Amino acid sequence: MWYCASQGERTARCAEPIVSRRAPSSCPGCGSTELRQDEDVLDTWFSSWLWPFSVHDWPAPAGSEAAADLRYFYPTDALVTAPEIIFFWVARMIMAGLKFGPTFTGTDEAAKNIPFRDVYFTSIVRDAKGRKMSKSLGNSPEPLDLIAEYGADAVRYTILNLAPVGQDVTYAQEKNELGRNFANKIWNAGRFLLMNRESLGGSERAGEFSAAHADLADRWILSRLHSTLRDVEAAVGAFEFNRVTRLLYDFLWHDYCDWFLEMLKSRLYGGESAAVKQVVLAGAIDVYDAALRLLHPVMPFVTEELWQALRTRPAGATIMRERIPAADPALIDTAVERQMAFVQGLIEAVRAIRSEMSIPPSADVTLTVTAGPAHPAGALRAYEGYMQRLARVTQVTIARAGERPPLAASAIVEGEELFVPLAGLIDLDRERARLTKELERVEGMLRGIRAKLGSEAFTAKAPPDVVAREREKLASFEATREKLVRNVAQITSVDRSGGAG
């Protein structure tokens, strides 16, 4: 930056600084060659590129405390910044490290002189029109207003959830409903646990799922917790923070609240002893405690409040100082998770039949399930309590393959047929139409798979495991089609009065 230093006749432009990459030859105002360079200017980006060492008082005398700090903390692990300053700042810090780093690292090795190992580029928040949010455009909401309406945790969670790695965020204020609803769900789960502990007179001490009292739901939620711990750790290591929020959402909302707590109710409100109920509830609280610690970095306020309420804590205790549990591979049980997936499929199939056939929630429904090699009668009996509570089924009957009650709606879950007798409950024509529509869908899938497997270009070029999976899908859909054809034929033969024809 230069200034005109002429003592002669000057113009208004002579008072303006001259900004140029190279020394100007004359003043653009008066033409004078008498110029003065500002002696107290350091380029912003030049000064910023020295940041990794200057924060430790660099340059520091050898052997000084500042030099020791620099050797200890340099290089660091990660830099978080915006993508638009990759060259202005990020690249220049790397160049400065390569230039000056050897003076205090004592090596020319690039990996030890570059100031960071990873660079995480934050997303740019844009409005619905794709414009970068800014105060000058007036398209940026006031954060304090959002916090007042939705809560700090809700806003924080929503922004993280919307921010995929390397992509910008399209933001709309109403999207904060996602975070607020999630916070409410977590809060209500905590209230449920605490109210039941109070009513049962349970201990505040940590409990464990006892092998003598653990059922399928207990083993499943432990497996899902440790699967989630493992997956979250991997996602954090890859800087996939939006994936972290979705893993937490899936576990807490779907696995823990929608399924596990509902299954827990059948035990808490069933005929087991108070001592068993206390043990089961203590285990449920332990899982919830671990999930709160895992969620805390994303939603710090609601998790702190709930964690403090779960048990009496020492003075000064805070969830911020609690360790996030480490995933235990021994507790990840894929067989248990497959069993629970089958139970969930049964329950969802019964719920779908009730909905599609407009069966009133108050109507008594019985269920018949075929027992196959993968799901023998003993295992199906073990799921009966879940079916009764979560699918509102009054009775479960186990049938052999090929057996079917008259006038019954059917579904297929993992190759096993289930039937809901509909006498006096449904419109026969609607059930026939539903089965026919499902049959058309399955036949469409079969046509696509057969065409793919019939193509030499696919079977010759695709990996063997991909071809094998397509053949497995073909066999599964063919079996499903046979059962649907049989079901359509049977319901068609049923007399409109409800008797078999």
Image (spheres, helix red, strand yellow):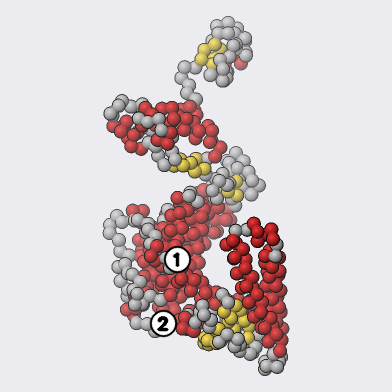
Q: Residues within 10 Å of mark 1 (few under 14, many from 20)?
A: many
The residue at the point 51 percent across, 48 percent down is 143
Distance, label 2 to label 1, CA atoms, is 25 Å
Q: Given the image, on which type of amino acid does mark 2 rest?
A: Gly
Q: Residues within 10 Å of mark 2 (few under 14, many from 20)?
A: few
Residue assigned mark 2: 270
| Front position in the image: 299 or 412 | 412
Evaluate whether residue 458 shows in this view.
yes
Q: Given the image, on which type of amino acid does mark 1 rest?
A: Arg
Evaluate whether residue 427 shows in this view.
no
Q: Earlier in the sequence, mark 2 or mark 1?
A: 1
Count of all numbered marks drawn on residues in the image: 2
The residue at the point 53 percent across, 83 percent down is 371
Pair 2/1: label in front: 1
Residue 354 marker:
none
Q: Position of residue 370 (x, y in %)?
A: 55, 83
Residue 140 placement, left or right of 432: left
Residue 324 placement, left or right of 257: left
Residue 126 placement, left or right of 317: right
Q: Secondary structure at mark 1?
A: helix
Q: Secondary structure at mark 2?
A: loop
The residue at the point 62 percent across, 9 percent down is 31
Q: Position of residue 284 (x, y in %)?
A: 39, 70
Q: Position of residue 403 (x, y in %)?
A: 59, 88
| Front position in the image: 5 or 462 | 462
Res 426 quadrant in image: bottom right
Q: Position of residue 194 (x, y in %)?
A: 38, 69
Q: Residue furthest top?
A: 8
Residue assigned mark 1: 224
